[in-house]
Amino acid sequence: MSASKLFLFVIFLMVKQTISQDIRAVDISIVNGTQFHCATTTCLPFSKNVVLDIFNCQINCLAVFQCQAARFNQVTQECALFGVLYGFNGTMVSDINSITLIVSTGMRTPSESESNWIVNGDAEIGPCNTMNNVLHPTDWNYSGAVTQVTYNNPAANQKTTDPGPSNRGRCHFYGQTSAVTTMWQVIDMTTAINPAQLDNQTIEFDFSAWIGGYMDQDDNARVSLTFVNQANQTVGNTTTLGPVLAADRAGITSLLYRQITGQVPVGARSFKVSVTMTRVNGTTNDGDVDNIVLRLY
């Protein structure tokens, strides 16, 4: 079918879903047999993952505040998440294998302050390593052997019975074998926040993570937050959580909570979150991180 506007039957439903400790009630339009039509290639997804079904695609979208729409392919089971659809010209094109989900403007509750801006900050999106091999984190850029690994994996170190977050899921981030390994992601805040708000010093941030390591070894992790302007230049100071060393953990394998709050600097348009895991002892990098969260309010 051509790119002309389709007259579609749209089903509206209220979806309530608990994600970690957040509850979101949103109005979602479900449009069967269509996908977005763009005048250019600018309406690209910021995340693509294979999920079990359309319900899980909905949950993936609700887990990140900047997600305004999603597309689920019924054949490949790919779930694509979209922010602001620059270039989207208001029409749809026919695709019998696709289902488009659109979050209604202004319908998200609670507000930004209770929504995590980091994509896959809890290591629960995508597959997790259950063996002693490298499986890079989903939706993160990476350098080195950083791995998304299950708790209770004998090849790693963190167990569900070790001290750590009460709302931990199945997986966490692990340094694996590299002496130093990193992962990072850059998120555009203007997909959901007016730049004028960012420049009048009214937006605050709450940045937190659970960070730890193995027994009496000082292998460690740092999680940093840097704001950048439209020219991709750093504005303000970099905020760093960690490291959490063996002395901080009393020589116990565990994850400890670290948190810093502050103000988003004038001129900021995007932020970069980076995780660096460093090996100090032994042959494996036992720096561990879970539940990385950035809230803007």
Image (cartoon, rainbow, N blue to C red):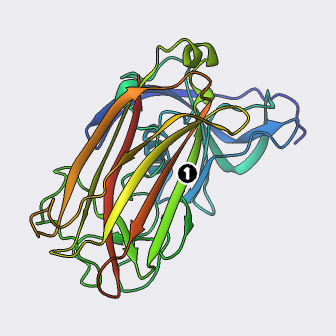
139 on left or right of 37 = left
As drawn, is 276 to the left or to the right of 251? right
Corner quadrant of residue 262: top left
- Amino acid marked by disc 1: Gln
Helix, strand or loop at mark 1:
strand
Where 94 falls versus 163 (above or below)? Answer: above
Q: Residue at x 48, y 70 (%)?
A: 181
x%, y% of residue 230?
71, 32
Q: Is residue 194 above or below residue 141?
A: above
Quadrant assignment, res 233: top right
Q: Is residue 2 visible?
A: yes
In this view, the residue in front, 68 or 233, is 233
Q: Residue at x 65, y 28 (%)?
A: 9
Mark 1 nearby-residue class (10 Å; few <14, some 14–19, many ≥20)? some
Does residue 25 appear anywhere in the picture?
A: no
Side of 283 where 117 appears, left or right:
right
**Residue 83, position as x, y percentages in the image:** 62, 35
x, y (%) of residue 84? 66, 31
7 sits to left or right of 285: right
Quick one: quadrant of the C terminus? Answer: top left
Image spot of residue 152 (x, y percent): 21, 75
At a point 12% along the width and 60% down the height, the residue shown is 163
Tell which of 196 and 260 is nearer to you.
260
Q: Pointer 1: what residue?
A: 185
Which one is nearer the viewer's eye here, 99 or 265? 265
Which quarter of the rendering shows the N terminus? top right
* Along the viewing direction, whichever of 191 and 53 lies nearer the viewer: 191
Number of marks: 1
Residue name at image x 56 percent, y 58 percent: 49
